Image: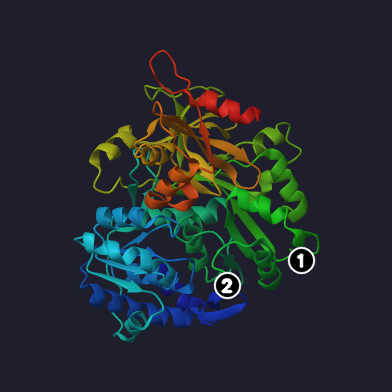
Amino acid sequence: MNLANLLHRAAKAWGARPALSTGRDIRLSYAQMGARVPKLAAGLIAAGQLQPGDRVALLLKNSPEYWELLFAIWHAGLAAVPINAKLHAREVAWILDNSQARLAVVSAALAEDLLPLTKEIASLQRVMIAQERDFARLYDAEPMPMAEVAPTSLGWLFYTSGTTGRPKGAMLTHANLWSATMNYFADVDRVDPVDSMIHCAPISHGSGLYGLPHVARGANQVIPASGGFDPAETLDLIAHWKNCSFFFAPTMVHRLVHAPQITTAKTDNLKTLVYGGGPMYVADLLEAMGVLGPKLAQIYGQGEAPMTITGMDKAMHVDDGHPRYRERLGSAGIARTDVELRVVDAEDRPLPPGEIGEVICRGPVVMAGYWRNPEATAQTLRGGWLHTGDMGSIDEDGFLTLKDRSKDMIISGGSNIYPREVEEVLLKHPEVSEVSVVGKPHADWGEEVVAFVVARDGANVTAEALDALCLDHIARFKRPKQYRFVPALPKNNYGKVLKTELRAMLQKE
């Protein structure tokens, strides 16, 4: 069943309810949005000369147009490729080329850097700038009927960062996204038409995925006027919109709780704050609940099983009578209703409670595979299970505790950063002999990127030169915040760099 049914059902049942808002202002009702999307769908088809199944890339900051575009893409039987708006233009160009996107819709602020690179992409027929005149004309098209799509049809091509320096496209089908939507109702929260979802985090990621159950129940999608996360603005929106929910990275929770305005803020309207995408320390969690009340819920997932592997609902967060209450707060919760969870050894044999191994799962939310990457698909989905690459243990009650992130991933401000991608850029410098990138704990951002650099004999490498190199090749948020110039990197007998020692050194500091 086509995901666009979520919108069209809501438009019939709750047509007068607000669908899209900016700041404190209502932009469209569900009836209006339901009438505009079939026109926009037809306009997209004509603008890009698109065929069913073609990919449409979205490189936009949070905006009401983002929601209309997503549902128009699905209504037309196309596939969405939402791209992180913080990525470097070269990274975006690689995704556009790999996804074979035929049409891209971009924010005006991002167009200047991207447009020169589009000439290199053979598949790309057209780039449109949202909110400009040519884009506005798309709404003048004759409305088209909703396309019939198979449950296995590609709906969302989610590009994850890759340890090889190239992201992989997780193929999320209509069935996957339906499952994730229903799973929200089963395990996270009830949604009613009087509710709202405020999108401070990127719609291209978790906030957008959790917007789907809110559309399904006719709830208001609110875009901050800033288009992102500002603690003062967020608290103002909480005071205005009743029954509001959010998806936050833990670092955003920390910043909200420590905002100067929190002491006088009215947070009664806050319904649910779902957090995920990085570690939440127990002390920070208890502090947040003390400030915001029993409003927090946790999820653990990844792009390959979006938002839906394990979780802890609001009731579990306040079950302080349980003898292992604090241990549970430090966990990632229990397997979601329609997800089977295991921790296994190197041969994929299940491990008993308490033993550490790789976290694997299976269920209807797990991706169909990686786009144009059968080798990675076979490796990651071997045996019919999604191998997350995360290490953890499951206790006798089924609570998963993540012990370490394999592949040495760094999570900064809720964004995934893979060290090898940064290392490969730094090694482009002719005077760099070796480099190792690790994460250093940071009070506000969770972690920050630190590069340990070994220069070639007699060379004089500067942090400024390395920073400029990074800014030419990768997104600004991925570049190291510190460069440590060292004579050698710690290694084991096999020549492997011991990142554990580098992290331990930073931890002591």
Of the pair 375 and 361, the residue shown nearer to us: 375
Give coordinates of residue 478: x percent, y percent. Answer: 47, 47
Type of the residue with mark 2:
Ala
Which comes sooner in the sequence, label 1 or label 2? 2
Residue at image coords 38%, 52% = 472
Relative placement, left or right, of 248 versus 290 is left
Are the residues flagged by discs 1 and 2 in contact, CB closer than 8 Å? no
Q: Pick the quarter of the image with the C terminus.
A: top right
Of the pair 449 and 158, the residue shown nearer to us: 449
Q: Residues within 10 Å of mark 1 (few under 14, many from 20)?
A: some
Residue at image coords 48%, 71% = 63
Number of the front mark, 1 or 2:
2
Q: How is the image coloured?
A: rainbow
Type of the residue with mark 1:
Lys
Give the SS element for disc 2: loop
Q: CA distance from mark 1 to mark 2?
A: 19 Å
Of the pair 467 and 11, the residue shown nearer to us: 467
Quadrant of res 133: bottom left
Residue that numbered label 2 is attached to: 225
Give coordinates of residue 6: x percent, y percent. Answer: 43, 68
Numbered tag placed on residue 266 in the rendering: 1
Give coordinates of residue 87: x percent, y percent. Answer: 42, 55
Of the pair 353 and 481, the residue shown nearer to us: 481
Please tell me whether residue 303 is drawn above or below residue 360 in the rendered image. Answer: below
Q: Residues within 10 Å of mark 2 (few under 14, many from 20)?
A: some
Relative placement, left or right, of 237 versus 364 is right
Question: Furthest residue to the front?
Answer: 458
Give the SS element for disc 1: loop
Give coordinates of residue 346: x percent, y percent. Answer: 39, 22
Q: Can residue 338 be seen from the camera position used here?
A: no
Relative placement, left or right, of 180 versus 171 is right
